[in-house]
Each structure stands twice: as C-alpha cells, then as structure tokens.
Amino acid sequence: MKTLSKGLDRKKVSEISRLKNEPEWMMKYRLESYGIFESKKMPNWGPKIDINLDNITYYKKVFDKIENSWDNVDKDVKETFTDIGLRKAEEEYLGGMHVQYESEGLYSNMLKELKDKNVIFLDTDTALKKYPEIFEKYFGKLVKNDDNKFAALNSAVWSGGTFIYVPPHTKLDRPLQSYFRIDSKNMGQFERTLIIVDEDSDLHYIEGCTAPTYSEDALHAAVVEIFVEKNAKCRYTTIQNWSNNVYNLVTKRAIVEEGGTMEWVDGNIGSKVTMKYPACILKGDYSKGTCTTIALADNMQVQDTGAKMIHIGKHTKSNILSKSIARNGGNASYRGLVRITKNAKYSYANVKCDTIIIDDKSKSDTFPTNICENNESSIEHEATVSKIDPKQLFYLMSRAISEDKATELLIMGFIDAFREELPLEYAVELNQLLKGETVIECRR
C-alpha cells in the first residue's frame, strides 16, 4: 500500500507521477496544472464549496496490480462491493467491467469477442503506457487544465479512470461498465475518463459511484472527455449514489462530429454537494446531443445539475430533460447553457426542467442561459415546479392505497422518462433506491 500524507504541493504532484512511472511530458503537464489550480479561485457562483483541501488525501494505492479474475480480488474488498450490489454475475450483461478502489483500479476484464474487434478498454494509467500515441493525441484536448479550478486539480493529481477506444465501423452489443468506490475518510478520488468512438461505431458505457458515510468530507473531482467521430454514437450512463459527506465536482464534455450522436443519461442520488453539467459540443453538421438527468436532493443535500449544449454545425439538434426531486430540506436546482452559434443555421434545441418539492423545507431554482445567434434556428425552454398533487394523492388513496405507497407511485411516475433510458437491471436498482427513501420520507 502507498498513501501520500494529506494536503498537496508540487513535491506530492511529482511523487504521484514518479510512483506511476509516467513519461516526462505527463509530469510536466501535472506540474503546470498544479500551478493553474493554485492560481484559480473557488467558483463564485452556485452552491458554496466549504471543504478543507489541506485535509484531503490525494493518492492512495491499495493493491499492487489489477486483477482480471473477480475470484482473485481481495476477499474483504469483494465483500464490500457485494454489499453495495456489485457482483460477478452482473458481467453476463456486460461486454466488459472495470472497478476502481480509492486511487487505482483493482479489477478489469473484457469479453474475448470485443478484444477480437480491437476494442481497447483499460484503466487510464495502463492506456498511457500501452497506447501513448492515441493517449497524447486526445488527453486534455477537450477539457483543458485551465478550464476551471477542479479540472486543474484533476489534471494535476488524476489517477485511474477508464480509457476506451472503439475502432471504425464497430458495434458493441453489450455495454461496458466501470465502478468507482471511495472507502476512506478525507479521501479524494480524481479519475480521468477518456473515450474515443471512431467513425460509424457505437458504444454504451455505464458508470457507478458510491462511498460510505463519514463525519468528515471527501472529494470526488473527475474529468470525462469523449470524442464522437463521424456518424458514431455514444451513450454515457451514470448512476452515482455518493454518501452525504462527498463533494461531487465533475467536468464532463463530449465533442460530436458530422452525423454523430452523444447521449448523456445522468442520475445523481447522493453527495453533500453535486456540481455537474454534462456538455455536448455539436461541431459537425447534423450532429445530435441529448442529456436526460435526475437529481434527488435529500436531507440538506445540494444538487446543482444540468447540461450544456453548444451548436456549431448546421442542422444540429439537442434535447435536455431534467427531473429533480427535493425533500427534507434539500436543494435541487437546474443550471444549464444552450448556445446556437451564428453559423449553426437550421438548428433546434429543446430544454424541459421539471421539479417536484415534497415538503416546505426544500427548494429548487432554475438558472437557464439560452442564446440563439442566428434567425434560422430556435430554442424552446419549459420549466415547472410543483408539489405532490393532493387530488392525485386522494384519488390513489381512495383506491385503498396507503399514503406512503401513493406518494411513491406519483414519484415513480414523475421520473418515468428517466427510468426508460436505463437498462432493465439498473432501472430496478434505481427504483429500489428511490422507493426505500420515499417510504422513509413519508413516515417522518
């Protein structure tokens, strides 16, 4: 095991690179990024980020190697993942799986049929060593190290994450999945995900995240870069259920070439504070981007989520559907940007934000920015904020359904559009999370 002491300085940034035996250009990139991180101030908009960065552990390696058989994974760690619902049997639904524990991967495997198609599915550290030319071509090109303070931090101390390359004209029949676990207090996790879906190819990638609850804060500051080439398609599904002591501050961005499609399906159930706005840069003509999100703000949690769609190519289309639930003093807000540029003629964007507030202690705000710079395109925006409809509740209860169950049914109906976007087994898991929480809420 190798764990750096708490806090961060140039020496520790260099030590991370040295421990990973990285090329010189990556160490220079890390040190440059650390300087940018030091110079940038905390975001002065959105929720307050009240975390002591000097009290965070920025690197912790628990295991010496990545296993390719689940049977060889450490027994105690395997039991931890079993307790949170991750089991070896799930792999039969997947083309491949990657598991990260703290700062490094501990397990990675992929079906032979995908290897035969020359699909690359690795942890990001290994990809840097095995495929340096592809890696350097794309890494940091979409989310630059001066994009924001936490992107700079990730660029300085990134560790682990997922690297995927799908060759041209390759269709994957099953999704690939990664799972990220923080298991120590005051831990920071800074995975870096880099995905390239080459021309006329198709990928569905699923990501899950959890952490136990401690009395002290933890930090998750990831960066995701996705390149969708001509006529390719990528769907990126995230279900994160961080504990309520985790600051979840993530930068996710995709660039889409001509005729390509990018789909974000983003579920945010936990954390202390989440700031996450998946973005699509619709560069090519006839490219498409969608973002379907759900955010549950419970027990004083802050979910500041949304999406960004930047239209550059002509005849581009985007759709944002945001569903939020606030209860027990939670704050679930939508923050988004849609920009149709001057040359993106004949483009169309639609934004729909719906929030349901369960009690008088909770709140929700909507912060949309919609910009259309040419007269041949259009943007539609619709937002609703409501409470549980007492008439609907009364109707269900008059059919001998308890108040708890009736409230649960109304919430399940409210998020139905999001659940439809999930694979069956993940929709079932999401239902259980929300149903269990709903019953607790109704009994208070």
Image (tube, rainbow, N blue to C red):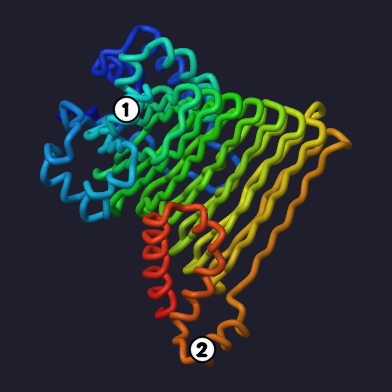
Please provide percent x and percent y for residue 192: 40, 29
Q: Quadrant of residue 443?
A: bottom left
> Residue 397 has which mark?
2
Residue bearing mark 1: 123
Please provide percent x and percent y for residue 131: 36, 14
Quarter placement of the N terminus:
top left
Relative to 318, 108 lies left or right: left
Relative to 403, 161 lies left or right: left
Please provide percent x and percent y for residue 390: 60, 83
Residue that appears at 37% across and 32% down = 191
Please, is residue 217 above or below residue 230 in the view?
below
The reply to whether dot 2 and dot 1 touch (C-beta < 8 Å) is no
Please, is residue 379 above or below residue 162 in the view?
below
Residue that appears at 44% across and 46% down = 238
Residue that appears at 73% across and 28% down = 313
Please provide percent x and percent y for residue 354: 63, 61
> Residue 103 has which mark?
none
Q: Quadrant of residue 199?
A: top right
